[in-house]
Image (cartoon, rainbow, N blue to C red):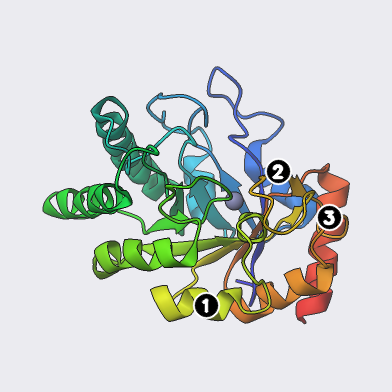
């Protein structure tokens, strides 16, 4: 495995019939000379159970770093039972399916509670998510909680919120994903972000290295190519270097532009 595996988000890589789309993630990774892939195991905007993937054995046997991203719709923090309970169940199902493809971990957004709610209720819902799963033997792959760009009552947008969340979930072995676009949107100082997070969580497991189309503090989540957004590219490289962990690009662009970004990063980090 590369010292800093650099992967690319490739979506599910499956057709609606659960067949490989143009060779699937392994073919995409080869095309871009990526060290890893991030995939969804079902529709990211839906509530569907993951199906066994036709390329599960190949992903498991490959030396690629495989990361699974949970559906965006999941919100285990919410006080709304009709969202929280199916979110927990689907999170467990996706974690099991993530283990079947040899995933390094499963990324899930920190989620949020409603404006009228006390954020402490959301933190406690996260604690219960882990403690109930622990009764069933825990998650079969590490759960990696990602910082988000917006929301007044978000669980993982601001560093003080992250500290409250970590008091509740750190003891269960929760992992952390630092998304540079989201951190920028939330007004974080990227020059110190890795140290700031590590002071809270003790770890950064994965970096979503994305530039942003919007100014710092905008709360907007619009990813840009590494060399084209509002964040100085050197600052993104500094984050990648400081984090010293696997990287996934969620930048817009085709295979050729992702291949160029990988080369840029490999050279900068060498
Ligand atoms: Zn991300």
Numbered label attached to residue 196: 1
Numbered label attached to residue 229: 3
> Mark 2 against mark 3, which lies toward the viewer?
3
> Mark 1 against mark 2, which lies toward the viewer?
1
Q: Is 45 positioned to the left or the right of 22 in the image? A: left
Residue 65: name its quadrant.
bottom right
Q: Residue at x 49, y 73 (%)?
A: 197
Q: Residues within 10 Å of mark 2 (few under 14, many from 20)?
A: some
Q: Residue furthest top?
A: 17
How far is mark 3 from mark 1, CA to CA? 23 Å
Question: Tags 1 and 2 in contact by the CB under 8 Å rule?
Answer: no
Q: Nearer the viewer, residue 180 or 249?
A: 180
Q: Is residue 70 above or below residue 165?
A: above
Numbered label attached to residue 157: none
Whole-percent x, y for residue 255 in the image:
82, 45
**Helix or strand or loop: what does disc 2 sit on?**
helix
Residue where numbered disc 2 is placed = 27
How far is mark 1 from mark 2, CA to CA? 37 Å
Q: Is 162 positioned to the left or the right of 38 in the image? A: left
Whole-percent x, y for residue 21 in the image:
66, 28
């Amino acid at each position: 495995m590369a010292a800093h595996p650099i992967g690319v988000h490739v979506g599910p890589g499956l057709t609606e019939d659960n067949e490989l789309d143009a060779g699937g993630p392994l073919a995409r990774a080869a095309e871009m000379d990526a060290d890893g892939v991030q995939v969804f195991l079902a529709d990211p905007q839906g509530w569907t159970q993951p199906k066994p993937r036709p390329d599960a054995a190949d992903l498991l046997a490959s030396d690629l770093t495989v990361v699974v991203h949970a559906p965006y719709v999941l919100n285990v923090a919410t006080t709304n039972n009709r969202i929280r309970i199916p979110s927990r169940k689907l999170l467990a199902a996706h974690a099991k399916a993530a283990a079947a493809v040899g995933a390094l971990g499963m990324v899930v957004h920190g989620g949020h509670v409603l404006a009228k709610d006390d954020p402490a209720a959301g933190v406690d819902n996260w604690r219960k998510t882990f403690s109930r799963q622990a009764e069933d033997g825990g998650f079969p792959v590490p759960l990696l909680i990602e910082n988000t760009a917006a929301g007044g009552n978000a669980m993982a947008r601001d560093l003080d919120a992250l500290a409250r969340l970590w008091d509740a979930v750190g003891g269960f072995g929760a992992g952390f994903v630092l998304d540079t676009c989201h951190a920028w949107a939330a007004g974080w100082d990227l020059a110190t972000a890795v140290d700031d997070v590590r002071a809270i969580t003790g770890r950064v497991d994965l970096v979503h290295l994305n530039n942003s189309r919007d100014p710092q503090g905008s709360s907007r989540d619009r990813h840009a190519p590494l060399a084209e957004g509002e964040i100085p590219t050197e600052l993104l490289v500094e984050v990648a270097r400081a984090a010293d962990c696997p990287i996934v690009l969620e930048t817009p662009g085709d295979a050729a532009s992702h291949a160029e970004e990988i080369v840029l990063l490999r050279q900068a980090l060498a």
